[in-house]
Amino acid sequence: MNRSILLKERPAGKPVLDNFELRQEEIPTINEGEILLKTLYVSVDPYLRGRMRDEKSYIDPFKLNEPLESGVIAEVTESRNPNFRKGDYVSGMLQWKEYQVTNGNGLNKVNKEQAPLTAHLGILGLTGITAYLGLEKIGNLKPGETLLVSGAAGAVGSVVGQIGKIKGCRVVGIAGTDEKISWTIEKLNFDDGINYRTSENLRKSIANACPNGVDVYFDNVGGEVLDAALANINKFGRIINCGAISLYNETEIPVGPRPEGILIKKSALMQGFIVRDYVKEFGPAINQLSKWFQEDKLKYSETLIEGFENIPQAFLDLFEGKNQGKMVVKV
C-alpha cells in the first residue's frame, strides 16, 4: 500500500496533528512518458503554514483533502521516460506520498557522490539558494559590515551567517537557546549571538553585540525581534524580510512599533524577499554554494526525523524551535 498525508482541515492559529490525515491507497502504475518515484526525504519548512490558509499569496494554498507538498528527494523506481533511469535520484516539489507518478517536469537530478542527498534539500537546495540570493539581491554585503540574522540556528539563518563570514562581515545571530548560540559561534564561526528568550531588553542586547550598529539584518522571525533590530539599524542599512515565523500562527494582525520613522531617518531599505522571484538565477547560486561546500567553507547541519507518518509532527516542531539547521524527515 501507498501512504499519503492530506490536509484534513485548515488550522485556526497554531497547527495541530488533527489538521492532518494519513490515508492509504494503492501504489500507482505509470504510462508512457512517466516515472514512478519512491520518496526518500521530505523537507518541512515554516512557509508551509501560509499555504494552509485559504487566501491568495505568492503561491497557491493547499487544497483540503488533498496531499500537501514540499521539497522532496526521491528515487526513480520505474521509468517509461527517456530522461530518467531506474535508480536516478531527483529533487523537486512533490506530494507527501510514499510513491507517486510524475512526467518529470520540474525535477532535478541530484548526485549523491557530490554531497549527501539531504544537502540538496538544504544547503545546496532551496534553503541555501534563499540565503545566497537574499544577501545578493538585497543585502549587498560589504567587507567589514555587521550582519545580524534571526533564526540563526535554523535552515536559512545558519547559511546566511556563514555566507556573511565568507564575505568578510561581522556576524551576530539571534536564536532561542544558549545551545544554539554556542553552536553558531563554535561550529559556524559567528562572532556573537543573542538568546532572545533570556534577553531582558533585546534592543540593548543587539546594541551590545553590534557596537558599530547593524548594516544588514536578515529577518526570518518578524515581530518584536524585527522591532529591536530596526532600532539598531545603521544609515543606509538593508533589512531583508525573508520570513516571519513569530506571526504565522496569529489569528489577528498584531500591532507593533511603526517602522517608517526609522526607515526615513536612516535612509534604510526594507524589502520583502521571495526566492521564487529569482528562479532564473538558481543555477549560478547552486554553483557558488557547491563551490563553497566543496572548499569546506560552508557547514551543513540538519535535524533528521525518521518515519513517513512523522512528517506532520516534524512540521509542528518547527514552531517550537526543536530544529537545528534543516528539518528533514527520512521516509
Image (cartoon, rainbow, N blue to C red):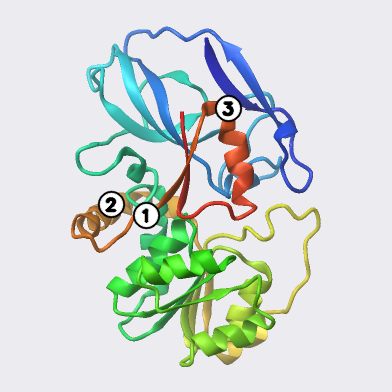
Q: Does the image show residue 238?
A: yes
| Amino acid at pointer 2 | Ile
- Secondary structure of the residue carrying tag 3 is helix
Vertical comparison of 130 with 45: above or below: below
Q: Residue at x 40, y 65 (%)?
A: 160
For label 3, the residue is: 309
Q: Residues within 10 Å of mark 1 (few under 14, many from 20)?
A: many
Q: Is residue 320 left or right of residue 323?
A: right
Q: Is residue 241 left or right of residue 161?
A: right
Vertical comparison of 315 with 196: above or below: above
Q: Residue at x 23, y 19 (%)?
A: 85
Camera-side residue: 134 or 190? 190
Spatial separation of the CA atoms under disc 1 and disc 2:
7 Å
Q: Residue at x 61, y 35 (%)?
A: 312
Vertical comparison of 189 with 200: above or below: above
- Secondary structure of the residue carrying tag 2 is helix
Callout in the foreground (2, 3):
3
Q: Label for residue 189?
A: none
Q: Position of residue 61 (x, y in %)?
A: 63, 38
Mark closest to the chain's N terminus, 2 or 3: 2
For label 1, the residue is: 129
Q: Residue at x 59, y 13 (%)?
A: 24
Mark closest to the chain's N terminus, 3 or 1: 1
| Amino acid at pointer 1 | Ile
Q: Position of residue 303 (x, y in %)?
A: 47, 47
Q: Are marks 1 and 2 in contact (CB under 8 Å)?
A: yes
